[in-house]
Image: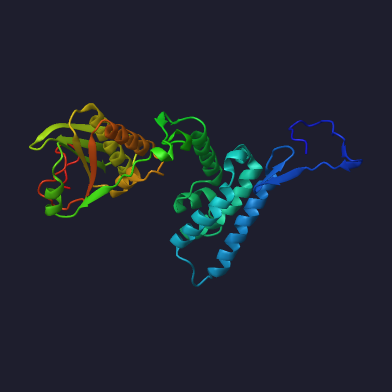
């Protein structure tokens, strides 16, 4: 197959063992149909036909007098129809800007939008999409392609850093892994039995009214000696804030001279990520590396999980951010 967008070109003459090799106008690779002019019209037609067949099966199930709940239809559209059309969108996304391709996509989306909003067949597509709360498929394809390119190519998205997993080759050799775990503090007696470290770090993360932050409170055996607040972009999650607070705590351990440290967190998911050697989250990998360096320096660090709002007397959260009891 000759891949070119030129209107005229010389067709090569190929043969092998005296047998002529015919030319193809399209080829299917991993479910993506590529034509010789890179129009992707055949691929779009195939995926739209497949999606319409799914819709027809749904329409036969939903009779005039009864039918599926709109949210069930939305789930079918989101989980079955949209992924079929968005498959390999990063490869054929430019074709979604053509009018002919948009008509095929609109014919698929129109039926679902009508059933979601309960409108008549004469309703316009744009009105049905607005009432159904669906994003037009051509825009959705551009969005999926742009997100894929940002994740695989550059490291920023609209001026913000994109979270990436650490490459396996950049992690420590399995022979250098140190067994890690955390202790769950369920009552006051557990707290008192494990409250023997020289320095204790209390970490917490929160997302309130679109603002994401984390706090770190540093205590010696008697009182708080230092506290700090960490600000994250609004697109981040509480899980990321909890991981960041734990990672910053491990950084501070490397700077201190005491011998025993304790890190207390109310996020079991964050602690499980840090102690799981196979987890490749960047903050978790850095936290494990810091703990290994601290161990080589003769510093012993213990990790503790405290159930949120457990009401333990000696485990109040940092007074700076966010204000809640652990």
Looking at this view, is 223 or 134 the one in front?
A: 223
* Residue in the image at 60% along x and 52% along y: 107
The quarter of the rendered structure image containing the N terminus is top right
Residue 81's image quarter? bottom right
Asked whether the viewer can see residue 3, the reply is: yes
| 242 sits to left or right of 127 | left
* Label total for image: 0
| 313 sits to left or right of 158 | left
- Which scheme is used to colour this image of the protein? rainbow
Q: Residue furthest left?
A: 222
* Residue in the image at 82% along x and 41% along y: 23
| 70 sits to left or right of 145 | left
* Residue in the image at 20% along x and 37% along y: 261
Residue 320's image quarter? top left
Up-down relation of residue 46 to residue 38 (above or below)? below
* Residue 127 horizontal/vertical position (percent): 49, 50
Up-down relation of residue 45 to residue 224 (above or below)? below
* Residue in the image at 40% along x and 31% along y: 160
* Residue 313 horizontal/vertical position (percent): 9, 49
* Residue 80 horizontal/vertical position (percent): 54, 56
Up-down relation of residue 69 to residue 80 (above or below)? below
Asked whether the viewer can see residue 119, the reply is: no
Q: Residue furthest bottom?
A: 65
Q: Residue furthest right?
A: 18
Looking at this view, is 146 or 120 the one in front?
A: 146
* Residue 40 horizontal/vertical position (percent): 68, 42
Looking at this view, is 254 or 76 the one in front?
A: 254
């Amino acid at each position: 197959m000759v891949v070119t967008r030129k209107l005229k070109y010389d067709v090569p003459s190929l043969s092998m063992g005296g047998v002529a090799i015919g030319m193809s106008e399209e080829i299917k690779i991993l479910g993506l149909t590529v034509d010789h002019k890179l129009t992707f019209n055949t691929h779009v037609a195939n995926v739209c036909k497949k999606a319409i067949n799914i819709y027809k099966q749904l329409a036969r199930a939903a009779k005039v007098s009864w039918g599926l709940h709109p949210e069930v239809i939305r789930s079918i559209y989101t989980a079955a129809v949209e992924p079929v059309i968005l498959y390999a969108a990063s490869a054929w996304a430019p074709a979604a800007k053509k009018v002919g391709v948009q008509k095929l996509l609109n014919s698929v989306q129109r039926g679902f939008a009508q059933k979601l909003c309960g409108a008549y067949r004469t309703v316009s597509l744009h009105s049905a999409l607005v009432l159904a709360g669906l994003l037009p498929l051509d825009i959705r394809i551009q969005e999926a392609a742009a997100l894929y390119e940002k994740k695989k190519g550059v490291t920023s998205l609209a001026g913000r850093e994109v979270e990436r997993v650490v490459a396996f080759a950049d992690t420590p050799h399995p022979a250098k892994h140190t067994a890690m775990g955390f202790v769950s503090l369920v009552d006051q007696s557990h707290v008192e039995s494990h409250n023997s470290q020289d320095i204790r770090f209390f970490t917490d993360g929160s997302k309130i009214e679109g603002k994401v932050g984390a706090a770190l409170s540093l205590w010696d055996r008697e009182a708080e000696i230092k506290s700090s607040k960490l600000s994250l972009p609004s697109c981040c999650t509480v899980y990321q804030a909890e991981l960041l607070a734990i990672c910053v705590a491990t950084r501070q351990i490397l700077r201190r001279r005491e011998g025993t440290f304790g890190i207390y967190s109310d996020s079991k998911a964050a602690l499980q990520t840090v102690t799981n050697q196979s987890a490749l989250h960047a903050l978790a990998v850095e936290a494990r590396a810091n703990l290994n360096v601290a161990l080589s320096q003769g510093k012993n660090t213990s990790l503790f999980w405290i159930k949120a709002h457990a009401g333990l007397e000696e485990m109040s959260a940092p007074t700076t951010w966010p204000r809640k009891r652990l």
